[in-house]
Amino acid sequence: MPNSGQKIFAALDTTDVEEARNLALRLKGSVGGVKLGLEFFSANGAAGVREIAKTGLPIFLDLKFHDIPNTVAGAVRAVMGLRPKILNVHAAGGPAMMRAAVEAAREAADAQNIRPPLVIAVTVLTSLDDDDLTAVGQTPPAADQVIRLARLTQDCGLDGIVCSPRETASVRAACGPDFKLIVPGIRPNLSVANDQKRTSSPSDAINAGADYLVIGRPITKAPDPAAAARAMAAALTES
Ligand code: C5P
């Protein structure tokens, strides 16, 4: 795979373990890893994740933990046996919760003698607009809240955030070169947005400062998912 393929995490948004496993096997060698989220985890739990891990593909476990620090630390310890490469929490859970998550991940990695996962945060869900922020007592505009929470995430020692293509350049400018930016909402063909409102091509997202791209349907619904992923990786190399 071109090295740029390593930057792509394919979102396996399904409740069906066999479908996810088959896709993962087809994608192996063409992507850097796969993302499993709440839909997959709620249906299949840790056993389902282990099935996908057996393919050898790195896993971004997108469970967006948000609870009191002690509970989040316990949840992080509980999933560390699955050896995720990336896991995430909600920045809105606050500084103590974020620090507890990182500490738990690093301690568990040490105990297992493995490299710690990237612990990243979700700042403002891209489904929320300024009116929604006001409704939940947060200060709009959303773009400013993203930067506030990105800086807080960095201060708490986390590795990065998930952000939309639209926010990537401003977060990169605010948080510097070492902060990891994981970017969904990627469309190689911008005319096919599905339900995504703020999309970007793979190369525009990388040029704006993305470290990893999360790509779902443009890969998983393609007639040949591995070929689609390889074409996107090749386009990154050319850009
Ligand atoms: O199919 P598609 O490429 O739109 O999938 C994008 C993936 O990234 C989905 O798993 C979606 O839940 C996730 N995601 C997103 N926007 C965010 C955070 C996560 O699209 N802000």
Image (tube, rainbow, N blue to C red):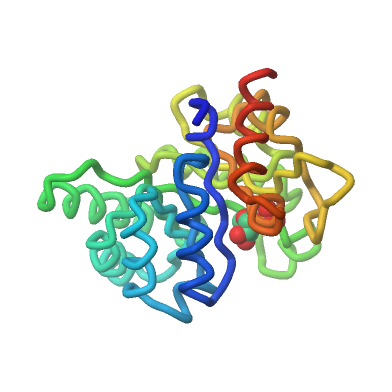
Describe residue 50's horizontal placement relative to residue 221 as left or right.
left
Residue, far bottom: 43
Q: Which of 147 and 31 is in front in this view?
A: 31
Q: Whereabouts is ligand 1, in terms of quadrant?
A: bottom right
* Visible residue check, residue 134: yes
Can residue 125 be seen here? The reply is no
* Quarter of the C terminus within the rendering: top right
For this orientation, the residue located farthest to the top is 238
Residue at 10% x, 52% y: name it: 111
Query: As displayed, is residue 107 above or below residue 189?
Result: below
Q: Which residue is drawn at 48% across and 56% down?
A: 24
Question: Residue 206 placed where, x, y %?
Answer: 63, 28
Q: Relative to 133, is 219 above or below?
A: above
Query: What's the residue at 70%, 59% (across, down)?
Result: 221
Which residue reaches farthest right?
191
Q: State whether residue 190 is above or below residue 122.
A: above
- Residue 89 x %, y %: 44, 58
Q: Where is residue 51 shown, x and y percent of the image?
A: 35, 67
Vertical placement of residue 129 versus 175, above or below: below
